[in-house]
Image (tube, grey):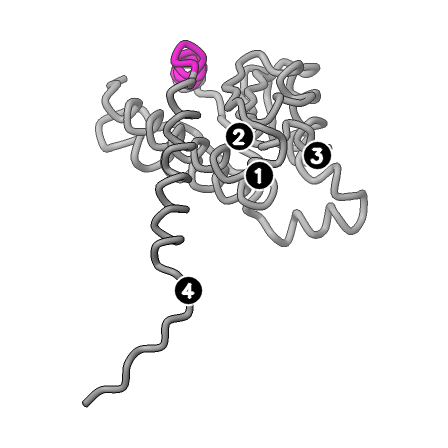
Amino acid sequence: MAAPREKIHDSASGVEFARRYVARLTAVLQRLDFRAVAEVIDAFLLARSRGSTIFFLGNGGSAATAAHFANDLGFCSSPEGHTPFRALSLASNTAFITCLANDIGYENIFVWQLRNLMKPGDVVVGISASGNSPNAVKALEYARDNGGVPVALVGFDGGAMKEIASHVVHIQTEKGEYGPVEDIHMVLDHLISNYLATIEK
C-alpha cells in the first residue's frame, strides 16, 4: 500500500486565493480604455506604413514583456505577404545593457540605445507598472524631444511616463499591485499583435 501523500498546504486556501486573484484581474480588465488601445494600434500601423521602427523597453517583468511584444509584432503580426513590422526590444541585448549600466549608469541603458538607433517617426513603447522607472522615463523624454512617438503602458497612478507619452494605456490599480498590471500588459501584447496580423498592407 502506498504511503499517504504528505499535505503541505490547505488546498481550499489555494483555491480561494486563485478565485480572488482572477476576480481582481477581471475587475481591472473591465476598466480597460479600449480607445486608448486603439490609439496605440493606430500608432503601430502608421509606423509600419512609413517604415519606422517600434522600440520596446522595460525592466524586470516588463523587460520580458518588451521582448515578447517585439517578438509577436515581428513574427505573428508580420506573416508572409504582409509588410512586416520593424520591432526591436531594447531590453534584450545583455552585453550592451551591462556595458552601458557599468560605464554610464543604469538610468541610461535605453536612452543611449535610442541615441544610436532612433529616427524621427519611430515609436518608443515604455512598459512600467509604476510609470516612474528612471531609465524608461528618460527614454520617453528622449523620444518626445527628438521626433519620436512616445507610448506608455503603465499601472498604479501612471507616474511620470503618463505625462510624457503621446499615447497611454493606463492600467489603474493600487500602488504596488504589480501582478494584475503586468498580466494585462501581456494581454495587450496578444490583443494588439493578433489584431495587427489581420490588417494586410
Q: Is residue 144 visible?
A: yes
Q: Is residue 24 left or right of residue 77?
A: right
Q: Is residue 117 magenta?
A: no
Tell me the number on the disc at residue 55: 2
Prevalent SS, magenta region: helix
Q: Comparing marks 3 and 1, which lies closer to the viewer?
A: 3
CA neighbours of label 4 inside 10 A, class few (<14), some (14 to 19), many (20+): few
Marks 3/1: CA–CA distance: 11 Å
Discs 2, 1 touching: Cβ within 8 Å? yes
Q: Secondary structure at mark 2?
A: strand
Which callout, 4 or 2, points at the residue further toward the start of the chain? 4
Q: Is residue 114 left or right of residue 23?
A: right
Q: Secondary structure at mark 1?
A: loop
Residue drawn at (58%, 48%) of the image: 93
Residue that carries the numbered disc 4 in the rendered image: 9
Q: Residue 132 at x, y = what percent?
A: 69, 29
- Tell me the amino acid under the disc marked 2: Phe
Q: Residue 85 at x, y = what percent?
A: 38, 27
Discs 1, 4 touching: Cβ within 8 Å? no
**Quarter of the view holding residue 184:** top left
Q: Nearer the viewer, residue 81 or 168?
A: 168
CA neighbours of label 2 inside 10 A, class few (<14), some (14 to 19), many (20+): many
Which callout, 1 or 4, points at the residue further toward the start of the chain? 4
Discs 3, 4 touching: Cβ within 8 Å? no
Which callout, 3 or 2, points at the residue further toward the start of the chain? 2
Residue drawn at (40%, 39%) of the image: 20
Residue drawn at (59%, 26%) of the image: 156
CA neighbours of label 3 inside 10 A, class few (<14), some (14 to 19), many (20+): many
Residue that carries the numbered disc 3 in the rendered image: 135
Which callout, 3 or 1, points at the residue further toward the start of the chain? 1
Q: Residue 21 at x, y = what percent?
A: 41, 40
Marks 1/4: CA–CA distance: 41 Å
